[in-house]
Image: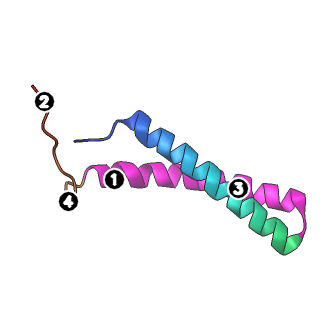
C-alpha cells in the first residue's frame, strides 16, 4: 500500500516543527542569542522540510519492508 502525498506532507510538517524547536532551543542554550537561534532554526526548517519530503517519497517507491493489506468484503 502506498502513502498519499497529503499524509507524507503532514508527517513532514509535524516532524520539522518539532526538530526545528529543538534546534532553536539548543542554539539559544549554546549562544544565549535569540535572533541567532531563530535565524538558524528558520534556515534549518526551510532546507530540511524539502529534503525530508523528497526522502519520504523516494522510500515510498521501495517495496522492501512494505506489506499489502487485504480488504474485508
Residue at the image point whose x is 62% and y is 58% from the top: 19
Compare residues 45 and 20 and report the one nearer the observer: 20
Whichever of callouts 2 and 4 sits on the residue coming sooner in the sequence is 4
Task: Return the disc, 1 or 3, that comes first in the chain's sequence.
Answer: 3
Q: Which residue is mark 1?
A: 58
Q: Secondary structure at mark 4?
A: loop
Q: Identify the element where label 3 is drawn.
A: helix
Indicate which disc residue 64 carries. 4
Which type of secondary structure does the marked residue at label 1 adopt? helix
Disc 2 to disc 1, how far (Cα)?
29 Å
Q: CA distance from mark 1 to mark 4?
A: 12 Å
Mark 3 to mark 2: distance in Å? 42 Å
Task: State the mark number for residue 21.
Answer: 3
Within-10-Å neighbours for mark 4: few <14, some 14–19, many 20+: few
Q: Mark 3 or mark 2: which comes first in sequence?
A: 3
Q: Is residue 34 left or right of residue 27?
A: right
Q: Going 84% across and 61% down the picture, which residue do you hit?
A: 36
Tell me if label 4 and label 3 are in contact, CB under 8 Å.
no
- The answer for how far apart the CA atoms under marks 2 and 4 are is 24 Å
Residue 9: x and y in percent read 47, 40
How many other residues sit within 10 Å of disc 3, few (<14), some (14-19) or many (≥20)?
Answer: some
Amino acid at each position: 500500500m502506498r502513502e498519499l502525498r497529503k499524509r507524507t506532507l503532514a508527517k513532514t510538517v509535524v516532524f520539522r516543527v518539532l526538530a526545528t524547536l529543538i534546534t532553536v532551543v539548543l542554539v539559544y542554550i549554546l549562544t544565549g542569542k535569540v535572533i541567532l537561534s531563530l535565524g538558524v532554526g528558520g534556515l534549518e526548517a526551510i532546507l530540511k522540510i524539502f529534503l525530508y519530503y523528497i526522502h519520504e517519497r523516494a522510500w515510498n517507491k521501495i517495496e522492501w519492508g512494505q506489506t499489502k493489506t487485504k480488504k474485508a468484503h
